[in-house]
Image (tube, grey):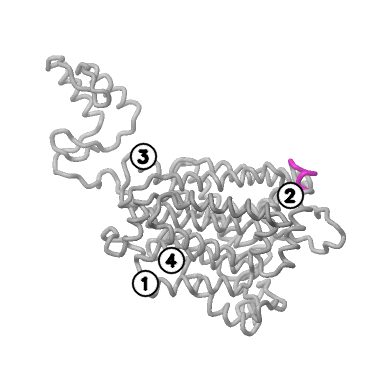
Amino acid sequence: MAVTHREAATLRRAGPAAQPAGVDLSFSGLKTGLLLYLIAAMPPISFGFAGIELGPTRTVLLFLVPLLMAQLFAGRFGRLRTPDFLLLGFWMWQGISIFHWHGSQAIQYVGSVGVEMIGGYLVGRAYVRSVADYERMMRFYGLMVLVTVPFALYESITGDRLVSRLFDMLPGVSSGGGGTSEKRLGLFRAQVNFSHPIHYGIFCAMGFTSSFLLLGPYMSRGWQYLRAGLIGFGSFLSLSSGGFLVFLIQAGLLGWRWMMRGTGRPWLIFGILFAAFYGTIEVLSDRSAFKVILTMATFSSYNAYWRILIFEYGMQNVWQHPVLGIGLNDWERPTWMYSGSLDNYFLFVAMVYGIPAFLLLATAFLKVLYQAMAMKISGSNSRLLRARATWVLSMVALILSLCTVHVWGKVYSLVFFIFGSGIWLLDEKDRNRADGPGDGGETLPAAQAPTARRGQAYSRKQATAKAAVQSSTEPDRPLPSRRTGQAYSRKQATAKAEVQSTTEPDRPLPSRRTGQGRC
């Protein structure tokens, strides 16, 4: 995604020897809040408290959200970004819509659902602040997936939901995993520690690209393929087209990227070919290209037909209530459509909360994706290139999958966590623009920044004062202009330096005499 031919060539050649010395991916570098959040996503339990259904994820977020929100607005996680305001606006519009239809019920609903959404985003936004943080987090996430795969295999073969059954033995909690697993392709659908097989498939698939691309240089080739293969296998065991689609899209995009490694602008070529493919289907098929592609992306034609009906009748409800949606009321559909489930998260948002809520959410996703893809990254910065490609491919696959599935509970929170864990790329983009691309590692404080030669460090204001003294003692001879080549006087240069000293941050600059960074 927006990787040039030269960058792609560097990325292919990158290996363990090409990484910066001292790369530390140990779990000890993970923030405590991040660890608590990820570990809380594993147990498949819920319990009631004061009339509110809680689980480990919601409980952890109830404590973290107020703290992280205050720190966000205090600038502890970099400057406020457009997606911060868009997601807060999305949360507020949810409250407005539910309050319009259901009154005071909005407090409990928006509080619980909003905490999962905005909380997951804030955890990713706050605790993943560099490429090293992102690598550590995805390494731990992949380990979480690998732990569940043996249980998924057992469940697929026997139909016994072992994990849910074990947690049901605990007093006062429920796993929500009762019932009999549905069979597909001769296997039972595995859901392990999630409330639905679709959610387990998405949970597994979100760790695929990181295992194959992001962390590949830090492991042997055999373990790289085994790890990625086990994660893909876990997603397959959900036997859910929506969950497995996240894996297939990532695998397809990675395959295309590998095939086109010797060409320039591979994604432009991909877009042109896809547009040609879509147009050909529209011309030659007796069905729309949308319906044909949806049929290809599901395990059965029946599911595809049902999702098409959901989309058609769902959009009728959207246009009937475009501003505030229908709230938690049942949506209008033919009586023979017995199920009220909505297998399309974005359709659900537009129908329940209104078109403005959909636009706020879609704009947040697409804006960050575009800015990340448009980043200019040095070809030598292989770590940052891999991290950017991993996050973009994962988000593209996730967004496309959400067009075919609905998410709730802890996987709903994890979706926004993955989104929030990529916001640091925008800060990296600003750093690259200001200081030039680095190695993508931890940012050193100004006092610890490496310098070319030893010498005295002094500030920009001290440099300005020194220039003022020189201008009063030395003749006013013309100096060359750096940008245009036009001569201008030393007094003009001093005045310009004084203006800069009052408007620019006091960042380290090279000393003219000693070569050391000025702090």
Q: Secondary structure at mark 4?
A: helix
Q: Are marks 3 and 1 in contact (CB under 8 Å)?
A: no
Instruction: Of the two numbered discs 3 and 1 on the same chain, state the one appearing first in sequence.
Output: 1
Q: Mark 4 highlights which residue?
A: 212
Q: Are marks 1 and 2 in contact (CB under 8 Å)?
A: no
Which mark lies nearer to you, 4 or 3?
A: 4
Q: Which residue is located at x 48 percent, y 46 percent? A: 71
How many numbered callouts? 4
Q: Position of residue 246 (x, y in %)?
A: 56, 63
Instruction: Of the two numbered discs 4 and 3 on the same chain, state the one appearing first in sequence.
Output: 4
Q: Could you say which is closer to the camera, residue 200 or residue 389? A: 389
Residue 69 appears left or right of 349: left
First to last magenta residue range: 317-323
Q: Which residue is located at x 57 percent, y 58 percent? A: 398
Q: Mark 3 highlights which residue?
A: 433
Q: Mark 2 highlights which residue?
A: 351
